[in-house]
Image (cartoon, grey):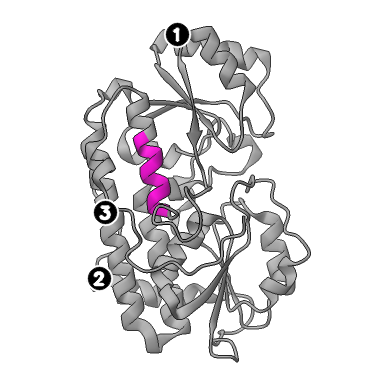
Amino acid sequence: MSLRPVPRASRATLAAGLLALLPLTACGADADVAGDGELRVVTTVAPITSITAAVAGDLAVIEGLVPEGTNSHTFQPPPSASALLERADLVLVNGLQLEEPTVELAEATMSEGARLVELGTEVLPESEYLYDFSFPEEDGKPNPHLWTDPTWAIRYAELVHEHLVDLDPDNAATYDANLDAFEEQATALSEALRADQESLSAEDRVLLTYHDAYAYFAQTYDWQVIGAIQPESFEEPTPKEVARLIDQIRDQQVPTIFGSEVFPSAALEEIGRATGARYEDTLRDDDLPGAPGDPEHSWLGLMRGNYITMITGLGGSAPALEALDVTPAVEDEADYPQ
């Protein structure tokens, strides 16, 4: 299966279509760069901040809003976020109903002409929405975790690029070069993933996770998500749900179940003890590894680490991923709240 980036030759067409949609994704009229000459961009979760920084480089002041290690589904922006949003030229959120309180605050506080862009909502057709264990269709909220799939992360970067170029056309050549570099690294990550996952049989590429953050990834790379511990309420599952998952783990002889270093799960520990499956508790949804400024503190570092953890945890090997350099091609100067 091929990646989804838009070819360079067709970007002019995409840009024309995007500009036609701007009244739907912007607050007020067309925005200009801030009066002090700096383009100010506010982002939400750290992977989006990292992708934005890769495209913008040092041409914008990028400020993340959601602290790393915070549950982004339940995050409530603090009062200080109003001032941050008020002076933004561009606000980039994941969308797909992930950050509703932040979107509401942005719509109420952003200055006239500033843009609010819901990346996932823009790039993902409604016909491709996925509903699952943590995001049942009856609740009406699709799974929002597109960024765990490199093909969708590239689409995010392309949309960020189009808005940056429209707001700051004088620096279009730099944004173009930065996007090319990000696409090259994301494609290399995808290729390394595909190579290393061949160390597992198709039947062994199964995920039981604390939270269903890998639905789109699984669809693209032919994995199977057999369950997620964290239901739509974000509480621990019921004993009946735990018993069902124990039976499923035993039936499918899954060797490892995957938890989060940020959100420990007593239920996953219980399932591990009951089935003999190893409990691996180091997956991350949106908490980048290392500290800001470290080479691995990036979307690339986040996803490479997760893929290595999943493949090796299930009995495979990941030499291509382990050899991959995840140092951002463009220096990341964004502000990541901790």
Q: Which mark is residue 8?
A: 2
Q: Toward the viewer: 91 or 270?
A: 270
For label 3, count other residues whose C-alpha is less than 10 Å away and answer few (under 14), some (14-19) or many (20+).
some
Q: Is residue 120 visible?
A: no
Marks 1 and 2, how far apart at CA: 48 Å
- Dividing the picture into quadrants, the one containing residue 200 is top left
- Camera-near label (2 vs 3) is 3
Number of residues whose C-alpha sits closer than 10 Å to that of mark 2, classed few (under 14), some (14–19) or many (20 or more):
few
Secondary structure state at the residue bearing disc 1: helix
Type of amino acid at the residue the image marks with label 3: Thr
Please give the count of numbered marks on the rendered protein: 3
Q: Residue at x 66, y 79 (%)?
A: 87
Residue 328 is drawn in which quadrant? bottom left
Residue at 59% across, 38% down: 262
Q: Nearer the viewer, residue 207 or 296?
A: 296
On-image quarter of the N terminus: top left
Reading the image, the residue beneath label 3 is 187
